[in-house]
Amino acid sequence: MTRLRTFVIAAALAAFAAGAAADTAVDPAVGAADGKFLQAATHGDGAALASQLDADLQWTDPAGRTMNRQAVTTKVPTVGVTTNDRVWYGYGPIAVAEANDGKLHALRIWVKRPAGWKLLVYQEVRSLDAPATATPGTGTTCENPCGAVPYTPKNATERAVMQAYSELEAAATGHKEDAWKMRAADEIALVSSNSDRTFDKPTRAAAIGKATLGGVAPTKLLTAKLFDFNDVVVMTSQHETDKGQRLHITRVWVNRDPSTGSLGAGGRWQETLSYQTAVR
C-alpha cells in the first residue's frame, strides 16, 4: 500500500477510494469532519469542537498529558499540526489521519457513530532533534510485553489482539525480522518521542534485523484500553521503560486476510501504526 499526501482533500479521497483495497477506502465525509475539527480547534472554539468529539475521546499533547472530552471542550488544547497535508487510511468504521510538521507529528483516529464521524483519539508526538544515544526498553528480559501482560481480555477479539501484540514485541526484541513482518501491516507507521525519525515497514524491519532499533524498543505494559470494532481494534496504553520513563502509546490493529488485503474473519491481526508520546 502507498501513502497519499492529500493536498486537495476531496479529490485525493476520491482517488484513494477508487484505487485502494476495500478496507482502505476512506469516506469523504470524514475528511469534511476533520476539516471542521481543525477549524474549531485552531480557533479554540470549545462549543463547535464538542460536536466533533466522541464521548470516549482521548487527547494526548506532546508532553504526554492525556485529557478526556470534558477537559478538552472546557479549555481547548493547542493544536500543533494544522496542515491539510494529511495521510488517510480507512478501516470500515475507523478512519485514520496522520499529519507532520517538521519534528511534530499528529494522529487523529475517527470512528463512525450513528450521529456521524467522531474523533476518538488525538495524539501528538515530537521527535528528537538528534539520534538517540540510548534505546529505553524492557531491560535485559522481555517477559512483559513479550509474554504475560497485565491485561485481561474481555472477548476472543481482545485475546487475539493481545496475542498479536506480544508476538510483535517479542519479534522486535529478538531481532526476528520475518516474524515481525507477519504482524506489521504494509502501511505501518511507527512514531516515537524517543527517536529522531519515523519508521515505515521496510526501515523498521531492517532496523530489527540489524539490532539497531533507532531509539524505539518494546516497553513494559502498565495499563491498556481496547476499543473493539470487530475487525478493527484501537488500543491505547501506558508503558514504562527500564529507565522509569512513562509512555502513552496508541495502536490500531486490523484483522486482515493476507491474500486479499481485506478485513474479515480468518485473517491475521496486524498493527497499522504505533504513536508513542513520552510523558514528561
Image: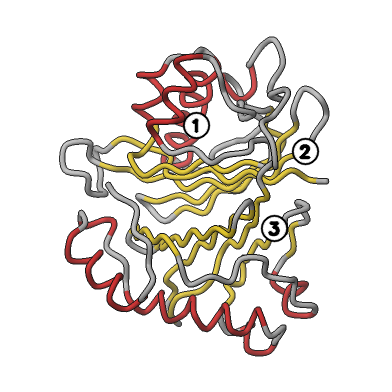
Under mark 3, the amino acid is: Thr
Residue at the spot x=66%, y=31% of the render? 131
Question: Considering only vertical position in the picture, is 95 above or below 180?
Answer: below
Question: Considering only vertical position in the picture, is 268 above or below 124?
Answer: above
- Compare marks 1 and 2 and give the one earlier in the sequence: 1
| Numbered circle sitting on residue 165 | 1
Quick one: SS at disc 3? strand
Residue 171 location in percent, x, y? 47, 19
Left or right: 198, with 69 as reference point = left
| Numbered circle sitting on residue 60 | 3
Residue at the spot x=16%, y=43% of the render? 260
Residue 3 location in percent, x, y? 34, 53
Under mark 2, the amino acid is: Arg
**Residue 48 quadrant:** bottom right
Question: Considering only vertical position in the picture, is 207 above or below 63?
Answer: above
- Compare marks 1 and 3 and give the one earlier in the sequence: 3
* Front position in the image: 123 or 203: 203
Residue topped by disc 2: 246
Residue 41 location in percent, x, y? 65, 79
Residue 138 location in percent, x, y? 69, 21
